[in-house]
Image (tube, rainbow, N blue to C red):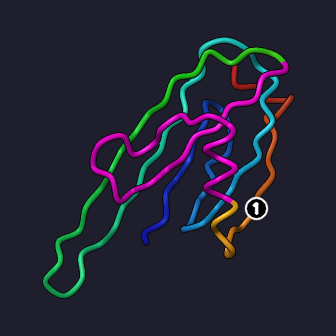
Amino acid sequence: MCPTEFTLPRQDKMTLYKSSEINYTIYSEGAIFFDFKTVCPGFDAMPGYTYFAQLSLNVQHGQEYYFVIDASYRKDMAIIVKKEEYLELIEKDKNLSRLTYQESKKEPIK
């Protein structure tokens, strides 16, 4: 699986690998765009590919949002899911890598 770059406006880019979980605290509110990009170089007889996805969420104070990124889907690479679906997915993955980030207060998203 090729790495996926995850970017929020005015924030550092993060690189996600297979079985990554990010707990990202956002202080800004309102419509925020989440950008995803996966680039896989070709090898042997397989051609390379690039996938892009963008999610827009209306972020509200105190709310939690869950989404799943799967670069194997050509459509809907990043989808929003309910908390129950998310918990079910991560429970099955024994090799999950957990990352924690937060929005920069010096350089906020909005």
Question: Residue 99: image x %, image y %?
Answer: 76, 58
- The mark total stands at 1
Which residue occupies 43% across, 69% down? 2
Q: On the rendered image, what quadrant is the N terminus found in?
A: bottom left
Left or right of 105 on screen, residue 52 = left
- Depicted 24 relative to depicted 37: above or below: above
Residue 7's spot in the image, x, y percent? 57, 42
Secondary structure beneath label 1:
strand
Question: Residue extending furthest top?
Answer: 30
Residue 76, image quadrant: top left
Which quadrant of the rendered structure holds the C terminus?
A: top right
Query: Mark 1 belongs to which amino acid?
Result: Arg
Q: Residue 72 in magenta? A: yes
Image location (x, y in percent) of residue 31: 60, 14
Residue reaching furthest bottom? 44
Q: Is residue 45 or residue 70 the one in the foreground?
A: 70
Residue drawn at the location 17% of the way across and 78% of the way down: 46
Disc 1 residue crowd, few under 14, some 14–19, many 20+, Cα 10 Å:
few
Q: Position of residue 45 (x, y in %)?
A: 13, 83
Residue at screen point 30% across, 72% down: 41
Q: Vertical placement of 86 versus 91: above or below?
A: above
Residue at (81%, 40%) from the top-left corner? 102
Segment tinted magenta in the rendering? 62-90
Q: Examine the image and state in which quarter residue 42 appears.
A: bottom left
Residue under label 1 = 98
Q: Is residue 52 left or right of residue 21?
A: left
Above or below residue 17? Residue 34 is above
Viewer-nearest residue: 23 or 102:
23
Q: Is residue 58 magenta?
A: no
- Give whichever of 105, 22 is nearer the camera: 22
